[in-house]
Image (cartoon, grey):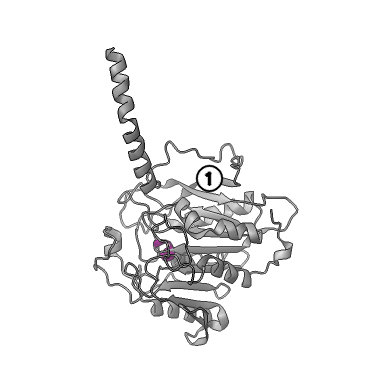
Amino acid sequence: KQRQNKYKTQLMFLPTIISITFLFGGLFTDASSEGRKHNFLRNGKLPIPTRDCTHVITVTVEEDHTLQGGFERPKFIEREFTVFDPAHKRKGEAKRPLVLAYHGVMSDSETMRQLTQFDREAKDRGWVAAYPQGEWKYYEKMTNWNGAGCCSQGQDEIAFTKDMIDYMVKHFNVDENEVYVTGVSNGGFMVYRLLCEMGDRENGKPWISAASVHSGLLGAWQADFSSCSISTDTSLVHFHGLADPVVNITGKPEGKQELLPFAPVTNAEWKSVNASIDYVAEAMCGSNSITSTSKPTESTTCHQMCDGKVEYCMVEELQHMWSGCSNKSLHMYDPNHATNVDATKYFADSFARHSSKKESELVKP
């Protein structure tokens, strides 16, 4: 009887335990990989994809610690990313474009996948989509990217990104000359840093052929931007809400407390939207003059520079949200998604315009 009562007591608390597990698992899916089913790369073989054409892959990154600000980190770090490959790789067929999508601070790759829906664009266009997972173990225990001024100074994201791209080129029939990157919030800061520091491959082509940023800015992570060398063979589209209270369009001085109570954000400093875009445009074409203006919707105004290679779009009343996101369960849900621009499709269209690939050449599922 005592044993039966013990089991009854345990069963009585089971629903509560399950609820707590789902609550914190949902909030902190980035905090631990233990207990989740992963398809790791083992013995040099590709992981077996799940039924929805998804792979979760781990690469071991050798970090450059010369500029790590004194953080104690091992030289070799395991980093993870999720790949959506709807057409599956086929030898002899045309190599495919790759889009990398970087999530925001305290978020994760799966949330970015749901938020942006780049799986949809990959499936429709014959691309491969990949969602990198931010680091969390060694600094503040919150996922973050060591972006251009926000929100960490620890991890070597340039090495991680190059390792991801090389892995995808080798194992997923990806075209190394057609790599697109996008990011939101802290992930947007990350994209600005990639534009600045990835540089060119040995063939003289840029690692990043096209980029897009949503609700992130160019941070002042270095006083003179001495390592910021943006290729003239790439492009950028930037989306920002005029009412964004987190990454304000007017910029942020170091030490100003934002809504997010996270020390790296408080310590960060970033430029305004105009200053960020002007810097990129001047690097790409030597001019920050607006060459044309368009209004894809009544609420969105887009300005083109450098003959369309640089574009920034301002969305009225949009806060720190992904323009066009209709998923109410997500923190960056856009309540005006029905009338605002679908940022994902807008970004994908921009990538396609600057691509050397014809969609008819690509294998679609």
Judge from the rendering whether residue 111 lies leftward or rightward of residue 54; answer left or right: left
Relative to 279, say whether 126 is above or below. Answer: above
- Residue 83, image x and y in percent? 56, 50
- Residue 7, image x and y in percent? 32, 20
189 part of magenta stretch: yes
At horizontal 27% and vertical 72% (from top left) the residue drawn is 253
**Is residue 85 at all visible to an observer of this figure?**
yes
**Is residue 230 at all visible to an observer of this figure?**
no
Observer-nearest of 184 and 58: 184
At label 1, which amino acid type do we have? Val
Observer-nearest of 282 and 108: 108
Observer-nearest of 154 and 115: 115
At horizontal 70% and vertical 65% (from top left) the residue drawn is 359
- Residue under pointer 1: 56
> What is the total number of numbered labels drawn onto the structure image?
1
Relative to 344, say whether 293 is above or below. Answer: below
| Mark 1 burial class by Cα count in 10 Å: few <14, some 14-19, many 20+ | many
Observer-nearest of 299 and 96: 299
What kind of element bears circle 1?
Answer: strand
From this viewpoint, which residue is outermost toward the top? 1
- Residue 37, image x and y in percent? 49, 38
Q: Which residues are magenta?
A: 186-190
225 part of magenta stretch: no
Q: State the quadrant of the N terminus.
A: top left
- Residue 285, image x and y in percent? 53, 82
Judge from the rendering whether residue 24 lies leftward or rightward of residue 121; answer left or right: left
Relative to 242, say whether 95 is above or below. Answer: above
Main SS, magenta residues: helix
